[in-house]
Image (cartoon, helix red, strand yellow):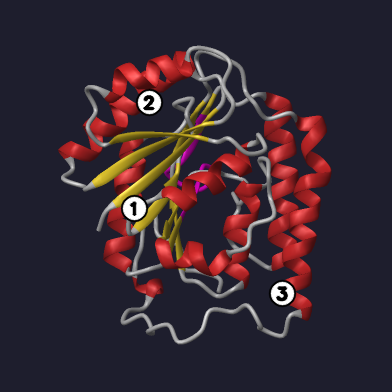
Amino acid sequence: MKVSVIIPAHNEADCLESTARDLFSTLTTAGIEHELLIIDDHSTDTTQAVLTAVGLEITTLRCVKNLGAPGFGAAVQKGLDQTHGDVVAIYMADGSDQPNDLVHFFRVMQELNVECVFGSRFIAGGHVVDYPFLKLILNRIANTSIRILFGLNYNDITNAFKLYRRDVIEGLKPFLSQHFNMTVELPLKAIVRGYTYAVVPNNWTNRKVGMSKLKIQEMGSRYLFIVLYCLIERWLSRGDYHRRNRPALNHDLTSHRGSFEQADS
């Protein structure tokens, strides 16, 4: 299977080279066929120049400009339309995600034959480094609320770092999110529509350079909109969007121990 790694980037010139090189080296060493698809989301710094230079050395790197409306979700959607892989990963440009975790996600997807792999920074084996305190508190409140509303065991829905089979992405369309609420729309739709998933721990390290693009004061209503949309679909759609005619899994997820967690769907 080929992995398409979508990396939205807005003014990430200071981070992109190391992020791309680390991913390329790790995935190549692991023998995983891949493409690194960096979406330049209306950058005004030297992002494009950095990508041009790095692209001469990293043969699996492609850069696509988001010429439509700006925003993290819009950039992800642009990337999803451009991917060539069998599975798709959403990966942060700032280096907060870890390439070795992506390899682990891929191995879990193969081993368990699930359609999605979701990372959690807040289960055994996962951890965060230098997470801003206010964002951490808001993160835990938001994720706990979502977990209770949907009756989930999964506790890190807002974590962008996830892996999906390509046919899952097609089954989640159309997308509504233009901003960071895309991180909630993708997994919640996947769960509500009945796709199988596993939860594994992952590590997160706060960026060393640059500034976070997530603006807390702008995102509350957008996250709430997506959560309510998915909740209404779950309650009232009568399964109209539920994935159908999928082959049954030939194993019992509960037989796996350690970092694997059974899907709630």
Give the amino acid at mark 3: Arg
Query: Where does the magenta region start and end?
Result: 118-128
Please give the name of the residue rendered at 34% of the width and 53% of the height, measured from the top-left corner. Answer: 84
Q: Is residue 179 magenta?
A: no
Question: Which circle's residue, 3 or 2, is located before the other in the chain?
Answer: 2
Q: Position of residue 50 (x, y in %)?
A: 39, 16
Q: CA distance from mark 3 to mark 1?
A: 31 Å
Task: Check the picture and name the quadrant holding the N terminus.
Answer: bottom left
Can you tell which mark lies on residue 19?
2
Residue hosting label 3: 234
Q: Crowding near pointer 3: few (<14 within 10 Å), some, many (20+)?
A: many
Q: CA distance from mark 3 to mark 2?
A: 37 Å
Please give the name of the residue rendered at 36% of the width and 42% of the height, measured from the top-left corner. Answer: 101
Q: Position of residue 197 (x, y in %)?
A: 46, 65
Q: Are marks 3 and 2 in contact (CB under 8 Å)?
A: no
Q: What secondary structure is marked by label 2?
A: helix
Q: Is residue 121 magenta?
A: yes
Q: What secondary structure is marked by label 1?
A: loop
Please give the name of the residue rendered at 57% of the width and 65% of the height, measured from the top-left corner. Answer: 172
Give the amino acid at mark 1: His
Q: Position of residue 120 (x, y in %)?
A: 51, 47
Kindly tell me whether residue 162 is visible in this rendering: no
Residue hosting label 1: 84
Give the amino acid at mark 2: Thr
Q: Nearer the viewer, mark 1 or mark 2?
A: 1
